[in-house]
Image (cartoon, coloured by chain):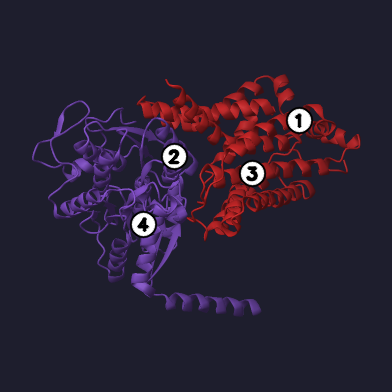
Chain colours: A red, B purple
Amino acid sequence: MNIDLVIGILNIVLISTTPLVLAGIGELVTEKSGVLNLGLEGLMLVGAVTGFITLVLTGNYFYSLFFSIISGVILSGIFAFLVLNLMTNQIATGLALTIFGIGLSAMLGKKFSGTPIEGLNPYYFIVISFLLVLMVSYFLSKTKSGLIVRAVGENHNSAYALGYNVIKTRYMTIIFGGVMSSLAGFYISICYAPMWQEGMTAGRGWIALALVVFATWKPWRLLVGAYIFGGVAIMQMNLQAIGVKLPGQFFNMMPYLATILVLVFISSNKLRLKLSAPASLNIPFEKNQ
Amino acid sequence: MIRKILTILSFFTIISVSALHADQKKIGFIYIGPPGDHGWTYMHDQGRIYMENALGDSISTTYIENVPENADAVRAIRKLAASGHDLIFTTSFNYMDQTLEVAEEFPDVKFEHATGFKRMDNVSTYSARFYEGRTIIGHIAGKMTKTNTIGYIVSFPIPEVIRGINAFYLAAAKVNPDVKIKIIWNYSWYDPGKEADAANTLINQGADIIVQHTDSYAPCQAAEKAGVLAFGQASNQEAFCPNAHMTSIEDIWGPYYAAKAQAVVDGTWGSEDTWQGFKDGMVEMSPYNTKLLPLDLILEAKNMETAIENGTLHSFEGPIYNQAGELVVKEGEVADDGMLAGMMFYVQGIDGEVPQ
């Protein structure tokens, strides 16, 4: 096996895994604060279409990135208002956000679908994705704010009793997650496959969600997990192209299968489950308790 | 009292609305992807629009997009059938059993299933002989490749796709016996990111021409970026990859859809199987890229199109051997439609096995 081939494979793995890392690390922070946002796929699609439309209209990558991020802030802000202030069910609201995002992005992008654009170099975002994992890891384990986020996620009543603003903290983490998802969407429609087509994220939001569980809410494991998922997908393509017979369907379901296995593994031991999952995940917070 | 009046009024409104459109036939479509894919579904939608323009007020059309090829399809098809549609086109191979299931429940509704082979009194099947186009691009690829390695991205192992691979390879190997094709099965019709990954993987492994049987234009774009050549799929994709795109095989559904809708309007619709190619205009080649292809090769390709139309050239002319070396089509004969419709084997010379 020659070195060019290996570099080529690594290159493709890096390019294809980055959206999973971006969306996954955002969701990890959101879940660490005790909120489950199932709206990643919708957020990604809206981020992708907003970035694409802005680029077509202005031809400017910064505006494109800016508006893509704004779309994430707005949508996740709405989600945050619903689940935090109105205390709606997080799972139902997240699913609604996904369905809404799929429809909204399709509607917005209808006129722009099929407009050719010049793609942006993906390497900026690959570097950014690694830096973000580093920063999130540092933030959650070494900074006071990070510890507050975790405290809020573990037991929001205690955190509140200690004087921390649970609602505000969760607003911040939800919006951070939303911004990361829209960034992942931007990356997909501007760098990875420079185009807009309806539903083009093709389930990557769900894989990112699975990834957070697979990583047992640890940033570095998330990075490793993402590259395992991405690497396996690209390796099976390479093996196929060389002529090795593989069950392709199996590799398509592998991320989900691996996640289920991890869930079985961590839930088989109550202590391990306690150490991993944020204890207040998916539990609404009421101030007047 | 007011409620009574409203009830009576609304009753009359419904009557008048339905009276207004009493003769109008409702025609529904089930799409596997979004109409904006600029590939397979896009061309079906173009066909729908053509039909609307051709028949005007005598019909109205509806479509449901992004319908998965599983039990959900039953729900989508039944929804159209139950809401008074007279004719329903289900436009993907794996809607086959779902179409039949709903057709049994609604014997008065007519169904048209694309690329399938199971028919009933109220279910027709239709398909295009895309493989004729694959013969043309195989010929071009065989002559244009410098590395003798061609990357081929495919969706699912179904006869239509395998027939395409075989037709492509036979034509390529005829002009270039050293040619090798590398095949990646994506197990999805539509995932731009994954299609780009597959294209990049094949290019990385030395392919200098990318062929696809998936629905987005991401592979062509990836080829453009890497500086290699490509063929588009289902519709003309030159706008997205002007320096890679040699030609595309285009599916032209409009005239067929218009004819079938007219038959429903006239009450002459009957269950049948339609399989048309270059000759009837259901398959066309996009304009050949004069910047990339030498003029004599373009001429050869055009002559082949004519020969296929005339019947002097066939995509599957014997002798054809399968991978085990058994003669499947004898010298001087061509593969019959039955063999083509159920083709689930690779011809000799293609590496690898057909996935089960």
Q: Do the residues bearing badges 2 and 4 touch, measured as CB atoms within 8 Å?
A: no
Q: Chain of mark 2?
A: B
User: Residue A279 shows which numbered tag?
Assistant: 1
Which residue is painted at 19% across and 45% down in the image?
B337
The reply to whether label 1 and label 4 mark residues of one chain is no
User: Residue A183 shows which numbered tag?
Assistant: 3
What is the secondary structure assignment of the residue under circle 3? helix
Name the amino acid, label 1: Ala
Answer with left or right where residue B62 lies relative to residue A152.
left
Q: Earlier in the sequence, mark 1 or mark 3?
A: 3
Which residue is painted at 51% across and 50% down in the image?
A195
Residue density around tag 1, few if under 14, some if 14–19, many if 20 or more, within 10 Å: many
Q: Nearer the viewer, mark 2 or mark 4?
A: 2
Disc 2 versus disc 4: distance between alpha carbons?
38 Å
Quarter-wise, where is residue B155 in the image? top left
Answer with left or right where residue A24 lies relative to residue B297.
right
Q: Nearer the viewer, mark 1 or mark 2?
A: 2
Q: Residue reaching furthest left?
A: B332
What is the secondary structure assignment of the residue under circle 4? strand
Disc 1 versus disc 4: distance between alpha carbons?
51 Å
User: Residue B226 shows which numbered tag?
Assistant: 2
Disc 4 versus disc 3: distance between alpha carbons?
38 Å
Answer with left or right where residue A212 lies relative to residue B297.
right
Name the amino acid, label 3: Leu
Q: Do the residues bearing badges 3 and 2 touch, measured as CB atoms within 8 Å?
A: no
Disc 3 versus disc 2: distance between alpha carbons?
25 Å
Q: Chain of mark 3?
A: A
Which residue is painted at 28% across and 71% down in the image?
B266
User: Residue B89 shows which numbered tag?
Assistant: 4
